[in-house]
Image: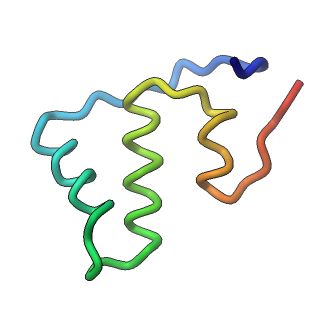
Amino acid sequence: MARGWKTLLTIDLTAEQRETLTAWQRSTTIPAGHAKRGRIVLLIADRVPLVEIAPWSGSPAMVL
């Protein structure tokens, strides 16, 4: 389990929004950056710790 700062950042997605972002992951016609951002939003919505999401963003993880 990751250690470090906890965040109060939460994202609540509707079923339609979640479906759209999930479809972006399979799409071959949208820019890769959009798919990456969609994946990050889905991970945040699933309450994955930010330290585990950081590698998806290309930013170094902050480990304390």
Q: Residue at x 38, y 64 (%)?
A: 35
Give the image location of residue 50, x and y in percent.
62, 33
Residue 15 in the image: x percent, y percent?
12, 36
Of 28 and 8, the residue lying toward us: 28
**Rendered residue at 54%/18% (across/down):** 8
Location of residue 11 with respect to 34 vertically, above or below = above
> What's the residue at 42%, 51% (across, down)?
39
Q: Position of residue 40 (x, y in %)?
A: 47, 47
Q: Residue furthest right?
A: 64
Residue 48 located left or right of residue 61: left
- Quadrant where the C terminus sits is top right
Along the horizontal axis of the image, is 43 left or right of 16?
Answer: right
Which residue is farthest left?
16
Compared across the picture, whether 40 is left or right of 56 comes to left
Residue in view at x 38 percent, y 31 percent: 45
**On the picture, is 51 further left or further right than 63?**
left
